[in-house]
Image: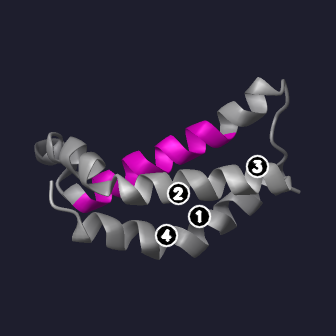
């Protein structure tokens, strides 16, 4: 089970990336020829960044997330995915 501190960390990351969606949409736009869908690419960049920070938080503690922790992370992201997508669609790069 993900600790309260880690859950709070994930939520703060999601909030940060939502607030900075236009920057990540601009980054994705530079790959538009390869990616095709700028919004989907921005979502992938944001999700990858959040996941990377989640894994890094365990690495910093010299631990590995359990399968249950990864599943719980996935559920947190699924609950907030619509917010992330909306922030990307509303963002003007």
Dominant secondary-structure state across the stretch colored magenta: helix
Q: In x, y percent, where is residue 2?
A: 83, 54
- Where 46 falls versus 57 (above or below)? below
Tell me whether the residue at label 4 lies in contact with that at label 1, contact meaning CB atoms closer than 8 angstroms: yes
User: If the image is split into quadrants, where does the N terminus sit?
Assistant: bottom right
Q: Residues within 10 Å of mark 2 (few under 14, many from 20)?
A: many
Tell me whether the residue at label 3 lies in contact with that at label 4, contact meaning CB atoms closer than 8 angstroms: no
Q: Residues within 10 Å of mark 4 (few under 14, many from 20)?
A: some
Q: In x, y percent, where is residue 62?
A: 84, 24
Q: Earlier in the sequence, mark 2 or mark 1?
A: 2
* Tag nearer the camera, 1 or 3: 3
Q: Earlier in the sequence, mark 3 or mark 4?
A: 3
Q: Which residue is at the front of the view, 34 or 51?
A: 51
Q: Which residue is at the front of the view, 71 or 8?
A: 8
Residue 66 can be seen, yes or no:
yes
Queried whether the magenta region covers residue 42, the answer comes back as: yes
Q: In the rendered image, which residue does mark 2 sit on? A: 14
The magenta region covers 39-54
- Per the rendering, the mark at residue 81 is 4
Residue shown at the point (66%, 42%) measured from the top left: 54
Tell me whether the residue at label 2 lies in contact with that at label 1, contact meaning CB atoms closer than 8 angstroms: yes
Separation of disc 3 and disc 4 at Cα? 18 Å
- Secondary structure under the numbered disc 3 in the rendered image: helix
Residue 70 can be seen, yes or no:
no
Q: Farthest residue toward the left?
A: 33
- Secondary structure under the numbered disc 2 in the rendered image: helix
- Per the rendering, the mark at residue 77 is 1
- Per the rendering, the mark at residue 6 is 3
């Amino acid at each position: 089970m993900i600790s309260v501190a880690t859950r709070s960390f994930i939520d703060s990351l999601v909030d940060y990336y939502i607030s900075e969606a236009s920057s990540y949409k601009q980054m994705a736009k530079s790959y538009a020829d390869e990616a095709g869908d700028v919004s989907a690419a921005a979502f992938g960049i944001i999700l990858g960044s959040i996941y990377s920070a989640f894994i890094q938080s365990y690495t910093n503690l010299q631990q590995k997330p359990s399968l249950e922790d990864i599943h719980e992370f996935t559920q947190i992201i699924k609950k907030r995915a619509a917010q992330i997508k909306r922030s990307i669609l509303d963002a003007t790069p």
